[in-house]
Image: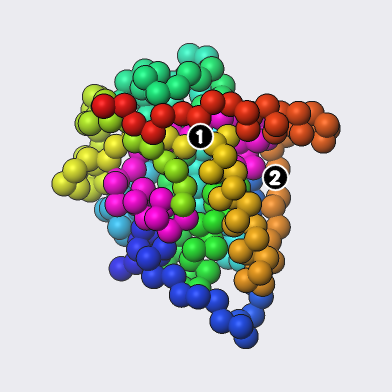
Amino acid sequence: MVSAYDSLQQQEPLSDNASSPLMKAHIVNQNDIFYKKGRLLAEERYREVWEINSLADDNDCAVVISEQGSVIGNMNVQLRREGMPLKSETFFGKEHWRPYFTASTSNIADISSLAISDNLRTKIRRPTMMMLILGVQSLGRLLGINHFVAIQHEFLIRILKKSLHLPFFRNNLITAPLGDIPDDRYWNRGKPPRIYYLNANNRQVIDTCCSFFCYLNVAGIQTSFLPRLKQDNLPYAAFKKNWHRDKEQVAIPESIH
């Protein structure tokens, strides 16, 4: 059985004569048909890998990757609102990130339900993960999200850092869930999952995402990003101003002991 975690390790290089796939990133809210298709993929994969019969859905948005009409990747995003804490806060405590950085009510979000199709051709597994990250980064820019929170097992984070060079950093002050947890293999597999953070404005994150675009281009993979979240039009001048402001932010320490 191949999980999303194994997929990155089994990546094969794209051959010179490989056909050029067209990969689409659908950036959508709960009402979109692709949100529902992405959830079906996530539920199927989590049932197979973690024996989870019911995957909780407290999310608001999704990045769903499709290729040749089939959904091949999913990642969900839960937004934080006044009076509505994140799912990660339910398990690990209110504002668990405060020792590491400050965040307003609306500029931090949970990412979860990462899933990659088990039927995916090996050569596009890593590109699928790249597209998911690029979609999440685009969603963050669209909604003004500066930090993402992931409840993940160490081995997946290790793969993401080694294979994709994404600088996730762990909350070293909270080593186990503080609240009631689901009774499934995801939470009860040896070491429990931990909290990890990704600063969307970190220079390494931005450079890494730029390298994803370059790789997908030279590998002959056609890409299309399709945001369908209702937002006010963002003038390029305002986007550029925010881009420079965000890149000038002070770097966040990667660990607190």
Q: Earlier in the sequence, mark 1 or mark 2?
A: 1
Relative to 113, 128 lies left or right: right
Q: Secondary structure at mark 1?
A: strand
Single out the residue that lies furthest toward the bottom: 17
Looking at the rendered image, the quarter that the N terminus falls into is: bottom left
- Where is residue 145? Give x, y as percent: 58, 30
In the rendered structure, find residue 227 and report the number of the disc placed on it.
Answer: 2
Query: Where is residue 239, by image quadrant?
Result: top right
Magenta highlight range: 137-164
- Where is residue 61? Give x, y as percent: 57, 38
Q: How crowded is the residue under tag 2: few (<14 C-alpha within 10 Å), some, or many (20+)?
A: some
**Three-letter amino acid code at disc 2?**
Pro
- Magenta stretch contains residue 116: no
Chief secondary structure of the magenta span? Answer: helix
For the point 47% across and 37% down, which residue is it?
198
**Three-letter amino acid code at disc 1?**
Asn
Looking at the rendered image, the quarter that the C terminus falls into is: top left
Whether residue 134 is situated above or below residue 71 in the rendered picture: above
- Magenta stretch contains residue 139: yes
Label 1 or label 2, whichever lies nearer to me, is 1
In the rendered structure, find residue 199 and report the number of the disc placed on it.
Answer: 1
